[in-house]
Image (tube, rainbow, N blue to C red):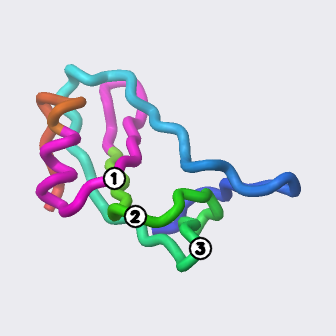
Amino acid sequence: MKLVKAYSQYGASLGRKDNITETSYPVKFHLQRVYLDCGGYDNGGAYWGQGTPLYRAWGAGSEEQQEVFFRAHSRNDAKIQLRGAFPNCKFYR
């Protein structure tokens, strides 16, 4: 997964902005762990720091793409957290 560039001549952004607009729509999410380099940056240059693994979930809503980044200890923990924000969500394998 290649993330879009998140830095400029002024430095790296701190994390990335979530796009959560349709929490009751039954979104089917792709869920993937975001790997960080030894400095805590994702492959698009956004700074996250070190710690609990980072996950990215994205899927098509009724009107626009839904995307969220969050920390979770495992994939199952990530699914539980995502269901808290999107009660009707499903997941791709």
Secondary structure under the numbered disc 1 in the rendered image: strand
Q: Name the spot of residue 5 as percent of width and height, x first.
A: 67, 58
Q: Residues within 10 Å of mark 1 (few under 14, many from 20)?
A: some
> Does residue 5 appear left or right of residue 29 in this picture?
right
Magenta stretch in the rendered image: 59-82
Residue for point 32% across, 43% down = 59
Residue under pointer 2? 51
Residue under pointer 1? 71
Pick whichever of labels 1 and 2 is earlier in the sequence.
2
Numbered label attached to residue 39: 3
> Does residue 67 appear left or right of residue 37 in this picture?
left
**Amino acid at pointer 1:** Arg
Q: Name the spot of residue 89 as percent of width and height, x first.
A: 15, 36
Quarter of the image for residue 20 reads top left
Q: Residues within 10 Å of mark 2 (few under 14, many from 20)?
A: few
**Amino acid at pointer 2:** Gly
Front residue of 45 and 27 = 45
